[in-house]
Image (spheres, helix red, strand yellow):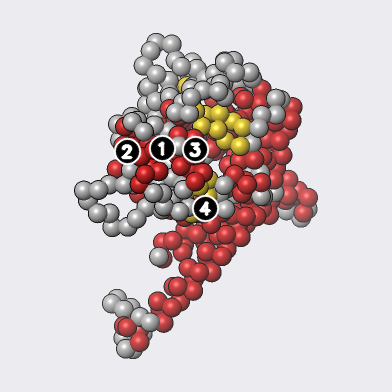
């Protein structure tokens, strides 16, 4: 509980700073500019190979990292490609890494936080003294530092996407004369990775009409309303999996919801219990999914049919009783129309109050403290 309390507090702090600096708004406006200047797609299509596990973990779950923006960057690249290109068109990079109209402008971050001072003023530490007297110069200095941090995040994302492995890499980068990465010349791979052939599987725009098991779709508001900027990687991964399941079983999703128990989730997607359960709970609080009613056994059999994959996904285990019944979920795209930064901030603030109250009650009812004895290792 203490970890949850501190983690939520840090997330609130970062989101508060992002709202203060307009970071999410600026990134959303940059994406909106790309969308309006291009084909204005209502939905972005992803090949399901990004989600499917190969061995223990999928490419998706390898990107569920506590730090960095690798998963976010790959989805942003798919968005940019489908705003600009037609189905089947090959991708090539047309954006610089920094400056106006660059990849860096598509990313929202909170900036440099100084733990010692508990503020975001660390950006001013190396500012020339003669410039500090001007509020305008201080603001420009902060923006310069923030731009440098965004570029650093973008380069870190490209490294992570390349280092997924020889076959799983989602980007490749040529090397310079001294072996350094040429970030500006990166190439985007398809969702299944670089592949094992001599010619890499370079990214092309997938078709919208492909079979349900081949693709999933992301509404444009996921990008334009700022959700891609404020959701954690585990939340994005959970949301993508739920979207994929809703497309696999649309009737079941609509009537009674979809669910995943541990075994099929690990076998098919490679996503672990903690990431899944926490992701579902946060998505529920943010209004992107909702609880559904349990299906009747006859309905499950009718929807699953003879497909063994669908039976694994939709059927409850019968030999071993689970310690809890899995939740049934429905994806609610209407929630995406809300401002992401405000919605998530309000939900996290509500959660923080609940966590703080619970911590206070635990402290008040601590039997050691009530007896007048301090905990081990603490002197009065």
Badge 2 element: helix
Kindly identify which residue carries mark 4.
Answer: 290
Q: Position of residue 330 (x, y in %)?
A: 50, 47
Q: Does any portion of residue 84 appear in the rendered image?
A: yes
Q: Quadrant of the N terminus?
A: bottom left
Q: Residue at x 51, y 23 (%)?
A: 210
Q: Residue at x 43, y 24 (%)?
A: 192
Sooner in the amino-acid sequence: mark 2 or mark 4: 4
Pointer 3 with pointer 2, Cβ within 8 A: no
Kindly identify which residue carries mark 1.
Answer: 303
Up-down relation of residue 190 to residue 117 (above or below): above
- Of residue 323 and residue 72, the one placed in the foreground of this image is 323
The numbered dot on residue 250 is: 3
- Distance, label 1 to label 4, CA atoms, is 21 Å
Pointer 2 with pointer 4, Cβ within 8 A: no
Circle 4: is it few (<14), some (14-19), or many (20+) Cα within 10 Å? Answer: some
């Amino acid at each position: 509980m203490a970890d949850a309390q501190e983690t939520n507090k840090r997330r609130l702090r970062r989101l508060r700073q992002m709202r203060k600096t307009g970071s999410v708004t600026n990134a959303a406006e940059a994406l909106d500019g790309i969308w309006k200047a291009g084909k204005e797609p209502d939905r972005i299509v992803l090949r399901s190979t990004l989600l499917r596990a190969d061995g223990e973990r999928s490419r998706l779950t390898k990107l569920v990292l506590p730090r960095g923006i690798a998963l976010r960057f790959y989805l942003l690249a798919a968005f940019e490609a489908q705003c600009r290109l037609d189905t089947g068109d090959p991708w090539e990079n047309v954006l610089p890494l920094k400056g106006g109209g660059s990849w860096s402008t598509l990313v929202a971050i909170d900036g440099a936080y100084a733990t010692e001072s508990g503020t975001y003023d660390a950006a001013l530490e190396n500012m020339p003294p003669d410039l500090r007297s001007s509020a305008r110069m201080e603001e420009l200095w902060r923006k310069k530092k923030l731009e440098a941090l965004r570029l650093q995040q973008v380069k870190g994302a490209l490294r992570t996407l390349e280092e997924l492995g020889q076959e799983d890499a989602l980007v490749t980068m040529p090397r310079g004369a001294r072996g350094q990465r040429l970030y500006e010349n990166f190439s985007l791979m398809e969702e299944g990775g670089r592949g094992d052939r001599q010619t890499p599987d370079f990214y092309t725009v997938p078709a919208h009409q492909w079979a349900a098991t081949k693709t999933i779709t992301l509404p444009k508001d996921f990008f334009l309303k700022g959700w891609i900027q404020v959701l954690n990687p585990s939340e994005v991964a959970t949301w993508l999996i739920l979207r994929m399941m809703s497309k696999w079983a649309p009737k079941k999703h609509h009537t009674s919801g979809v669910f995943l128990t541990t075994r099929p989730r690990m076998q098919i997607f490679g996503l672990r219990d903690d990431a899944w359960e926490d992701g579902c709970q946060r998505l529920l609080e943010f209004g992107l999914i909702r609880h559904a009613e349990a299906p009747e056994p006859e309905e499950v059999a009718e929807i699953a049919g003879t497909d063994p994959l669908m039976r694994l996904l939709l059927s409850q285990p019968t030999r071993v009783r689970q310690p809890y019944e899995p939740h049934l979920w429905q994806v609610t795209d209407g929630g995406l129309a809300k401002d992401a930064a405000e919605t998530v901030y309000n939900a996290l603030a509500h959660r923080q109050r609940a966590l703080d109250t619970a911590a206070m009650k635990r402290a008040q009812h601590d039997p050691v403290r009530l007896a007048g004895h301090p905990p081990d290792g603490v002197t009065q």
